[in-house]
Amino acid sequence: MESYIQIRNIVKQFYGVYALKDISFNIAKGSVHAIMGENGAGKSTLMKILGGVYQADGGSITIQGKEQRINNVNDSAACGISVIYQEFNLISELTVAENIYISDIPRKTFLGFVEKKKRSANAKELLEFLEIDVDPDAYVKDLTVSEKQMVEIAKSLSRNADIIIMDEPTAALNEEEVKKLEDVVNMLRKEGKTILYISHRLKEVFDMADTVTVLRNGEYVDTKPIGELNETAIIKLMVGHEIDSSINRQSYATERVLLEVYNLHLENVFAEVSFKLHAGEILGVAGLMGCGREEVLAAIYGLFQYDSGRVLLEGKEVSFKSPKDAIAHGICFLTDDRKDEGILPQMSVEENTTLISIRSAEKKLGFYVDPKSEAEQLKQMTDFMSIKYANPKQKISYLSGGNQQKVLLGRNLLLDNKVFIMLEPTRGIDVGAKEEIYSLLSQLAKEGMGIIAVFSDMNELIKVCDRAIVFCDGKVTGGLTREEFNKEKILTFAAGRKR
Amino acid sequence: MKKFILKHSDNLSLGAVIIMLFIGFSIMQPNMMTAFNIKNILVQVSLTAIAAAGMTFAYTAGVFDMSIGSILALVSVVVAKTATTYGFFIALAAAVVIAVMVGVVNGLIVTKLGIQAFAATLVTMILIRGIAVLIANGADIPLYSMEGIKFISSGTIAGIPFPIILTVLVYIFSYILYYTTVFGMKLRSVGSNADASKISGIKTNRMVIAAFVLTAVTAVLSSLIKTAQVMFGKSTIGEDFALDVMTTVILGGTLVTGGKGNLTGTLIASILIAVIKNGLNINNVNSYYQQLIIGIILIFALIVNGIKTMKNERQIRREG
Amino acid sequence: MRKMKKALAAVLAVVFALQMVACGSANEPAKEENKDTNAQETQTQETDAAETNDTDKASGESKGVIAYSCYNMSWEYYVTLAKGIRDAAEAAGYEYVEHDQRSDQSIMVQGCTDLINQNIACLVLTPCKPEAAANVYEMAAAKGIPVVLADISTEAQGYLACFKSDNYDGGVIAGQYALEVLADKGGSHKAAMITVDPSNTNISRSNGFKETIEPAGWQVVSELSGKSEPDVAYSCMQDIITANPDVEVVFCSNDPMAISASQAVADAGLVPGKDVYILGYDAQTNVFEPIKNGTVLGTVAQDPYGMGSGAVEVFLKNLDGEMLSYDEEGTKIIYTDQWIIDAANAAEYE
Amino acid sequence: MKKINWGKHVVVVILVGFWLVMFVMNKNFRLGDNLASILREAATAGIAALGMTLIIIMGDFDLSIGSMVALLGIIMAGVMNTVGLIPSLIVVCVAGMVCGLVNGVIIAYFKVPAFITTLGTYYSFRAIAYILNNANTIMCTNPTFLKIGNGNIGVIPIPFVILLVLGIVLAMVLNRTVYGRNVRALGNSEKACRISGINTKRVKMLAFLLMGFCAAVSTMIITARQACASPDVAINFHFEAITVVVLGGTKLIGGEGSIFNTIIAAVLYASVSNCLNLYHVDAKWQRICMGLILLVAFSFDFIQRLVVTVRENSQKKTVQKV
C-alpha cells in the first residue's frame, strides 16, 4: 500500500540558487518523522512549502493518495496541516487565547461574534493539558520566549490537524519543557496524528522519532527507521564527506591576549560568559539558534548594555556605551542580517564601503568627503578582496551576496582594527565566495587581528577556526582547541550537556 | 483595584485632567457647571468623538486618514443639494455611498499602489475638497425646507439630545466590533504584525480597506450633525477636522504604530478637547489659545509616551 | 485650436513616455498602462485650460482685459461683486477674467502678478490681506496698469479708487437699528459679537457696532471668532448663551454665521427674534428666509454688484480723462451706501 | 563616456517638455516678466522644499513648517520695526533653528514619530504667532528688505538666486560631507547606521534644525513679497513643500533624493500654477488639478519602485548565474 504522505521531486529556487533539489520521500501515518540536516540543508524551506508560505517550483505532494496543490496558507490548513514555524508568528498585541484561535475562532453562528468565554475556556483546557502555566487572557507581548514557544505549540494543536510540523520547537525550551513536549508528541502519536519533527538536538530525536530523513545542502540523503541509527551515524549522514585538507591550515594564533571577557551577564539573555581572544587567532563561536551567542557579542560591541561583568581590551578595562566607542577602540562588527542591518540598499558600492572610514579624524576638513580618497579606499578594498561591480556608483543592491559581504567587510577593514566580531560571515553566499572569505580571514589573522566568528555550519567552523567556544541557553558550555575539533563534541555541548 | 488603576492609568490620568480643568473653568465662570452647558459640551464632543471612533479603527489597522475633513465638506454639500429635492433618506444613502467609495479608494491606493496612508489620503483630501467646491459652486446651500433634519442636531429622545445618543450608539457599536467580533480581532492582528497575520491566513488588504471605509462612514455621521446644526451645506467646512480627530485619537493613547486602539481613551480625549474649547470660549478667551493648549498637551502626552517606550526598549531587545 | 490641443496632448504623452523609458527597463505591461493614464490625466488638465483659452481668444477684437482678483469665490457676496464687474466690463466691450485668492495672501500676490504680467487693461482687486497689496500696486504701476479696489481698502496708496461701503458705518447702522428695536423692551442690555479674526474688515464692523451701543448703556459681554465658518459660529453661539443666558442681541460679521447662530439659539431652547436678536451682515440670498420668519432680526445690506460695476466705471472715466470725485480725497475711497434689511423690507430686495 | 541616468532626472525632462509646450501655446508665458515671476514663485516653496528634501530622505515629514513661517514672520517683522533690519534677519534665522531644534529633539531623543510631533508643533507655532501680536498683521516697509522678495540681480529674481545658493550649499552638504552621507545612510537603514557607529539621534536632530533654517529663509522671502507678516499666512505650506519634493523624484520611503531635482520640481510646480492662472482656470478646477499633479507625483515614486524592484531581481538573477 502507498504511504500516507508522498513527497515527490520537490524543487525550490531562490534567485537561481537551489534551496531544494528534487526531494522525494514518504511519511507513514501516525509516525513521528524527524527531518535532520545542518543549517541551510533546506529543512525549513521544505516545511514552508508544506505550510503554503512558499510555493514549490516543481514536484508534487500527495496526501492519502490525493495530490494536493498547496498555493497558500489556507490550502495547507485545508489539507489538515498545521505548522509551528521556527520564527514566531504570534501577534504580540493579542491575548494568548486570541492567538491560539486566530484562524478558527469559536464564534456564535449569527454575526461573527467571538465567544470569549468559550475561547478562553478552550485555551485554558489546552494550556493545562500541555501543563503550560499561562493565563489565556494574558497578552503575548508579556510572555517569555519559552512561554511564547509553548503557545505556538498550543496554537498548532488547537486546529487539531492530522499533520503537525514542528520546526525547531525546542530551540528556546529548557529541559523540563522539552520533556513536556515529548509527552505531548507521544500522546499525539497515540491519537494517530502524523508529526514532522525538525530539531538539532539528537537526544530528542532518539527519544521521539520513529523515522529519520536527512537532508544535506538542499538534497535528499536518506531515510531510515531510528532503530538502524545511532548519533554518530546520523551526524555522518548530515555532514556527509569528511572535511577537506585545508583543515590543517596554518594557525597564526599568538600568546598575546587581545580581548578578555569575565562573567558577562544580562538578565534572562546570557550569564557568566567568560572567554579570551588572542592576537592572530580566529575564535569560532558555535551554538543553536536562540542560545544567546549573538547577543553576547553585540553587547561587547556596545549595541546594548550588559548588566554586569568586565571586558578587557589589551589588559585595559573597557565598556562601550555605543558602537562608536567600540570602533574608536579598534573593534569592528559584521552583522548576520546583511539585508536589514548591513547594506544601504539605495546607495552606491563606494558609499557603502566608506560609510565608517569617511569619519576618520586624521583628514584635514574632517567633515568633507574627498571623492579622490573615497575612490582610493574603494580601490584598495577591491584589490584586497577582488570585489566585482560594474562601476563604483552602482547600487550595492545589484551586487551578488558574496560581493555585498565583501563590501561590508571592507567597510570595517578600512580602519586598522584589532578585533573583528563576525556573525555568520558566509551566510547566504555561494561556495566560491565562501572560499575567498575563508582565505581572507586567515589573511587577517596573519596580520595579527583577533577574530571572533559565529558559525552555524560546523564544517566551516572546524575548517576556519583555531579554537571554538560553544553556547547553550546563554552560557558557555564548552571550549575546544583545533585538535579537539569534531562535530559530535560540538553538537553535544550545543545541546547543553557538559563534559 | 490596583490592577485596574494600572491597566487604565492612561485613561484615568486623562480623566483627572478633565476634572481639574472643569473645576478650574467653573471657578472662573460659574455657568460652566450648568446642566445646559454640560449638554452643550457633550454635543460638541459628539462632533469629533464619532469620527474619532472610526479613526481609531484606522490607526489600529496601522493607517490613518487625512481626507475626512474633505469628506465632511463633500457630504454636507451633497446632502444639502439632494435632501431638498429627493428627500432626506436618499441624501443619506448618497452620503454613505460616497463615504464607502472614498474609503475603498483610499484603501486601494494604500494596499495596491503601496503608497503610504499619509500620501494617499493627502491626495484624496485635496481631490474631494475640490469636488465639494465644484458641486457647491461658491454658494451656501440652504436646507430650511427640511425641518426634519434639525432632529439630528437638536432633537431629543427622553430629554437627551440626539447627537449624544448617536455618539453613545456609535461607541457601543465600536466596542462590540472592536472587542467581541472576529473582524476586530483580525484588524488588531493586521495592525500589530501584518506578516504573521498573513501566515495565519488573514486577508490583510481587505482589513485595511475596511478600516478606511469605517473611518469615512463615521465622518459622514459627524458631517450630518454639523450640517443639521447650521442648516446649510458649505464646501469650506472641516479644514482642520482631520488633524483635530487624529490629535484626539493619539491623545487617547492609541498606538500610532498600529495594533492597539484605545476607544475609551479616544472618547475621553475628545471630551477633554471639547472641555478646553468650551471653557475658554465661555471665559471669552481668544480661540488661538485653544490651539496652543491642544498642541502643547499633544506634545506633552507624546513625550511621556516616548519615555515609556524607551523604558520598554531593553525588554524588547532582550526578546531578540 | 483642436490641432493644438492634440499636439499638446501628444507632446505631454511623449514627455511621460520618456520618463517611463528613462526609469524603466525595456518591456513592461504595467508601464504601458501607466503611460496612458498619465497622459490622459495631464490631457484633461490641460484641455480645460485650453478651452478657457479658446473663449478668451474667441471674443476676438476686444478693447482689452479687465481682470478681477477676488477674496474668495466660495462666498456668494463676492460672486455677486464679480458679476457686477463682468457685466459692466463686457457692456463696455472689455474682456473679463477673474482670479480667486482663496483667502490666501500668497495666492493673492502670485495671482495678481500673473494677471499684471499679461498686460491687462485694468485690475480690480479685493485684497484678502490689505497689507499685502502694496507690492501689487508697484508692479501694476511699473506696467502702467490702473488698480481699482472693491469692497476692501488698503493703507498703502497707489490705487485709482476704492469702492467700498464703510464697514465701521455698517457696524454703526446695525448698532443703531438694534437700539431702536430694543429701546422699549428693558432687558439685560447685554450684547455679544461673533467676529472673524484677524480680518480688519470684520474688526471695523464689530467696532462700529460696539462703539454705537456701549454709549447707550449696553455692554458687550462676549466677543468670539467664528472664523467665518458657520459650524464654528454655531458652537461659539452655544457658549455665549452658556456664559450669558440673558444676552439680548448678537451681531455677526456675516450672514452664514448669523444664520447658524440663530440655529444655535433655537437649539438652546430659546426663541430667536424674541429672547435673542441676531444681526447679520452682507444680505446674502439665503438670509432672507430667516429674516422673513424672524429668526434673524436683520442684516446690513451692502451693494456688492454696485461696487463691481462702480469700480469698472471709475476705470472707464479715468480712461476718458474725467476728474474723479472721492468721498475721502486722502484715501480715494468712494462709499457705496448700506442699509438695514429686516422683515419689513425683505421682500423688495430679495 | 559618462552617460546621464535619465531615470534620476525625469522631472527635468517634464519641465523642458512643459516649457516647450507653453512657449508654443501661450504668448503671455513667453514674456520675460512672466518667466521671472515663475522663478520668483518657485523660490518660496522651493527653499522650504530644500530642507524638506533632507527630512524626507531620512524617511520623515515636517508638517509644522507653515506654522513656523507664520511665527517666524511675526517675530521678524516685530524685531525689524523695533530694532532694525540686520538684527531681525539674524533673529529670524536663530528662531527658525530653535523651532527646528524643538521638533528635532522631541523626534530624535524622545522617539516620537515625526508626523505626530510636527502635528503638535503645527498647532502650537501658529497659535503662538497669533498670540504674540494678538492676530494683527505687521507691515514691513523697509525698502531694502522688500528687495529680498521683489528685487532682481540682472534679470534673475533675488529669491531664485537665494534658492540656487542655498540649494548648492545643501547639495554640497548632502553629497560632499560626512553629515550628508549619514543623512542618506539613515534613510537607507537606521540599524546599519547604529552598527556603523553613527550617532543617529544627532543626525536626525540636525536635519530638523536645517529644516528650521530653510523655513526661516523662506519666511524672509514670503514676508518681503507680501510686505507684511501675518499669523494666518502659509496655511498649506507643508503640503506645497512635500509636493515639490516628491515631484523631484525623492522617494517617500526615504534613502534617496536630489536637491537639484527638488529645485527643478519647484520651478515646474510654479510653472504649472502659473499656467493655471494664465488660462484663468477656475479656482475650483485648480484645486483638482493640484490634486492630480500630486497623485501623478506619488505614482512616479510607485512606478519607479516597481520598475527598480523588477530590474534588481533580473540583475540578481544574472549575477547569480555568472
Image: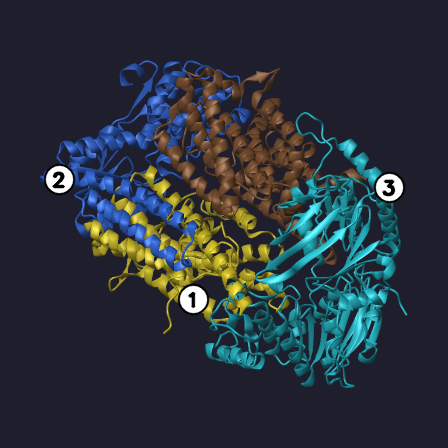
Q: Colour mode?
A: by chain
* Residue that carries the numbered disc 2 in the rendered image: C60
Label 2 secondary element? loop
Observer-side mark, 3 or 1, equals 3
Which chain is the one coloured brown?
A: B
Which chain is the one coloured blue?
A: C
Q: Residue at 46%, 30% (x, y): give it.
A: B98
Label 1 secondary element? helix
**Whole-percent x, y for residue B95 in the image:** 47, 27
Rendered hue of chain D is yellow
Task: Determine if residue C224 is in view.
Answer: no
Task: Determine if residue D30 is in view.
Answer: yes
* Residue that carries the numbered disc 1 in the rendered image: D171
**Whole-percent x, y for residue B116 in the image:** 52, 48
Residue D179, relative to residue D97: is it above or below? below
Which chain is the one coloured cyan?
A: A
**Whole-percent x, y for residue C38 in the image:** 37, 47
